[in-house]
Amino acid sequence: MATRLDIAERGRPLGSPLSVWLNYRLVPFLVAGLSKLWSHTLRVRLYGFGPVEDLVARDERFILSFWHRRLFMMPLSYPFRRRNAQGEDRGVAILSSDSKDGERSAATWRWFGIHAVRGTASEDGAKALVRMIQAVRQGWDFGITPDGPRGPLMALKPGTIALARKTGAWIVPVSLAFDRSFELKTWDRMVIPFPFATCTVRYGVPFRVPPRSDDAAEGARLQQEMDTLEAWAQTVGRA
């Protein structure tokens, strides 16, 4: 029997007990608490949600694919509580680096019920992909920013297509749009909603990647669908 992957394992030594408590316990707790409070002020609307609900009803796994600049408030796109075949609680997982920044990020996401597969696609893509495949096979859905963690902005990397092809999980393109928001001066131009804004979550049509697919063609398809969603999101923001 294969060893069960601990997707919340820490990658590297983190420092003194005080440093661990401050940086990887207190700070993630405060950031997550503020984000949750912020999200509760938003009016949330879902479009194209039916096919995703159908995937959950059929107990099929899927990959939420979204651009890095739409990451903030993305937990609103996953309102599910799921279990695997063994009855263990499951939800959505993300890829988080083995660095200290990655540990801080993973500790923050845990407060949202989001779990971290440790690894860095840009440094050791093959190892990261194996861990992601294991997580999906254990019953986790996956959330991926195909242009993360450092860009180029809105340029698709091959990991999403490879994960879908090797696991049979559905790809669900998704984007968030806000009627009132601002952009950070970061590489990804992260979009942040103002409190009490309307948040619209739009899902693309789920699709599968055949086992012997042309990855370049499938990647071009996903790029086009995500670009279409981004164009829609920008229109909402300017309305």
Image (tube, rainbow, N blue to C red):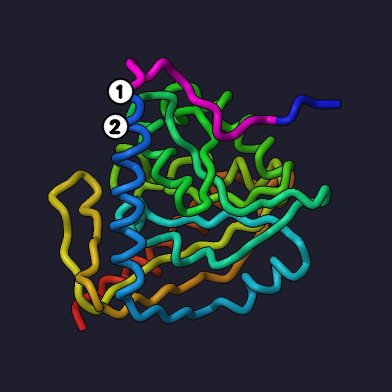
Q: CA distance from mark 2 to mark 1?
A: 6 Å
Of 138 and 189, nearer the camera is 138
Furthest residue in direction left, as rendered: 185
**Is there any visible trace of residue 75 in the rendered image?**
yes
Q: Main secondary structure of the magenta part?
A: loop
Image point 57% across, 71% down: which residue? 205
The residue where tag 2 is placed is: 22
Indicate left or right for 181 with 156 as reference.
left
- The total of numbered circles placed on residues is 2
Q: Secondary structure at mark 1?
A: helix
Rendered view: 237 above or below 149:
below
- Looking at the rendered structure, the kind of residue marked 2 is Leu
Q: Is residue 9 magenta?
A: yes
Of 230 and 25, nearer the camera is 25
The residue where tag 1 is placed is: 18
Rendered view: 5 above or below 79:
above
Image spot of residue 100 (x, y percent): 35, 25
Quarter in which the C terminus is drawn: bottom left
* Quadrant in the picture for residue 66: bottom left
Q: Are marks 2 and 1 in contact (CB under 8 Å)?
A: yes
Furthest residue in direction front, as rendered: 18
Extent of the magenta region = 5-17
Furthest residue in direction bottom, as rendered: 239
Image point 37% across, 54% down: which residue? 67
Which label belongs to residue 149? none
Quarter in which the N terminus is drawn: top right
Q: Is residue 149 magenta?
A: no
Rendered view: 5 above or below 114:
above
Image spot of residue 216 (x, y percent): 54, 45
Indicate left or right for 90 with 237 as reference.
right
